[in-house]
Image (cartoon, grey):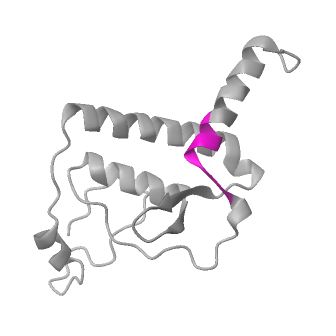
């Protein structure tokens, strides 16, 4: 696996290591280039992520939680991990395997939908004042 991510994000600890334990995953599920619609969707998610982190990180929200249909559990992902995953997809690689959050505090994570609604409310308040009634 090669580090194709911009500086400042978590590095692949096995980059360049011939004994990389994730190398076997490349053979099973090699990275596929995104089609234009997929690329646009990932770029939009990345832009949304920037907004959500700016609005919520200082309020104690550490990242996002997503329910995994495969394992039937919530997955807690910090802002940096989410950003790295999205950038990895844009770079044409599969998302790196990583350890789930250890004993996360569920209240410190929000869903994509919550973040989107919160961002929309902030825009609405900025445009119409906090006393706007729809």
- Answer above or below: position of 103 versus 33: below
Q: As drawn, is 125 to the left or to the right of 83?
A: right
Q: Is residue 7 visible?
A: no
The quarter of the picture where the C terminus appears is top right
Given residues 98 and 20, the one toward you in this image is 98
Q: Is residue 134 visible?
A: yes
Q: As drawn, is 8 to the left or to the right of 104?
A: left
x%, y% of residue 98?
Answer: 40, 73
Which stretch did the figure color magenta?
109-116
Q: As drawn, is 127 to the left or to the right of 89?
A: right
- Answer above or below: position of 75 versus 53: below
Given residues 43 and 133, the one toward you in this image is 133
What secondary structure do most residues of the magenta stretch adopt? helix
Instruction: Count numbered badges in the picture.
Output: 0
The stretch drawn in magenta includes residue 115: yes
The stretch drawn in magenta includes residue 10: no
Farthest-out residue, bottom: 19
Given residues 11 and 102, the one toward you in this image is 102
The quarter of the picture where the N terminus appears is bottom left
The image quadrant that residue 15 belongs to is: bottom left
x%, y% of residue 37?
Answer: 26, 32
The image quadrant that residue 102 belongs to is: bottom right
């Amino acid at each position: 696996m090669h580090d194709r991510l911009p500086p400042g994000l978590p590095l692949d600890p096995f980059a360049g290591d011939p004994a990389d334990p994730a190398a076997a995953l490349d053979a099973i599920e090699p990275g596929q280039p995104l089609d234009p619609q997929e690329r646009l969707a990932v770029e939009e998610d990345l832009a949304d992520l920037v907004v959500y982190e700016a609005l919520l990180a200082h309020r104690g929200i550490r990242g996002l939680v997503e329910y995994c249909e495969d394992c039937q559990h919530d997955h807690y992902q910090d802002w940096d991990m989410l950003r790295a995953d999205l950038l990895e997809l844009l770079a044409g690689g599969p998302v790196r395997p990583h350890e789930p959050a250890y004993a996360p505090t569920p209240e410190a994570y929000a869903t994509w939908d919550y973040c989107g609604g919160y961002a929309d409310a902030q825009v609405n308040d900025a445009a119409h004042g906090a006393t706007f009634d729809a």
